[in-house]
Image: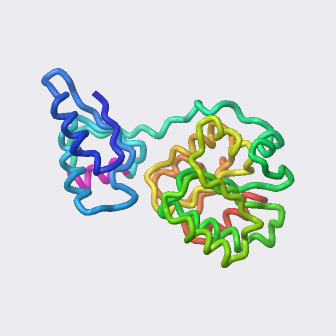
Amino acid sequence: MIIRYWLPFLTPCLGTIAKIGKTKTNKITCLVDNVIPHEKRFGDKILSSYFFKKMDGLIVMAEKGKTQLEQIFKIKKEIRYSPHPLFDIYGDKVSKELACAHLNISAEYNYILSFGLVRKYKGVDLLIQAFNEIKDDFPNHKLLIAGESYDNWQDYQDLIDKLNLNDRIVRVNEFIANEEVKYFFSAADYLALTYRTATQSGVTQIAYSMETPMLVTNVGDLANMVKNDVVGQVCENSTSEIATAITKMNE
């Protein structure tokens, strides 16, 4: 039995399923998205420890996850590292002109894509501030921020207003359906994942499937997934370093 784990809140349910399903002949393996949740809550470690210790083995998609299981949770059972697989469910890439027409945006601009749920740890605010630093050097560039906000978007909007960037940012504040994904990646010149913290990201694997270059911060397994100066740029997660990486992406 394989159980996928991503949030300590679910461990009483998942742990009960594991307890019922485990027999002398039936082994339980856990596929771990995040060993440590991005938004920490009281009791996370106790709940996670309860669950992990019921497993016969675990699979992680980031090397950092293996270290966390061994050092924080003292897991002695087998832990295997298998990088996040590529996605091939979003269809084929289309022309930029077709993608922009579908999204109702101008194909005359260059777009830097921020894709996925907007959450504090993903550093969309860092990308906005970094873009502000280089916007005059690249007057034809815009940010395309696509994804439902799990934070209060007004905090980001206040930053955009303060920096006078409303005409340089295209915002799609909604969950992006599977059939729409290819249009965003086809419209973009490259993807920017300016995470504060991370284990790994499935968004990088969408970019690979769409042959979209990437700019990522050096956190979690992102630097392992995106080779610097090969498929994009890897930088530290500060606005100045991100701004420099944006410049390099346009050289």
Quadrant for the C terminus, please: bottom right
Seen as rendered, the residue at the extreme bottom is 162
Q: Residue at x 43, y 52 (%)?
A: 199
Residue in the picture at 26% in, 57% down: 44
Q: Is residue 214 within the magenta segment? A: no
113 relative position to 24: left or right:
right
Q: Main secondary structure of the magenta part?
A: helix
Instruction: Point out residue 30 in the picture as x, y percentages from the top left corner.
Output: 30, 37
Position of 227 relative to 38 (above/below): above
Q: Residue furthest top?
A: 25
On the rendered structure, is 80 left or right of 251? left
Q: Residue at x 77, y 59 (%)?
A: 250
| Relative horizontal placement of residue 248, taking residue 179 as reference (left or right) | right
Q: Quadrant of the N terminus?
A: top left
Residue 108 visible here: yes
Q: Is residue 16 above or below residue 152?
A: above
Image location (x, y in percent) of residue 164: 72, 75
Residue, x 48% and y 40% (percent of image)? 84
Image coordinates of residue 11 in percent, x first then y, are 25, 45
- Whether residue 228 is visible, yes or no, is no
Is 157 located above or below residue 116 in the figure?
Answer: below
Q: Position of residue 138 (x, y in %)?
A: 80, 66
Q: Residue farthest to the right?
A: 108
Q: Nearer the viewer, residue 209 or 37?
A: 37
Q: Quadrant of residue 42?
A: bottom left
Hey, which quadrant is residue 166 in on the image? bottom right
Nearer to the camera, 247 or 142: 142
Which colour scheme appears in the figure?
rainbow
- Using the image as rendered, state which of residue 89 and residue 237 is in the foreground: 89
Q: Which residues are magenta?
A: 65-74
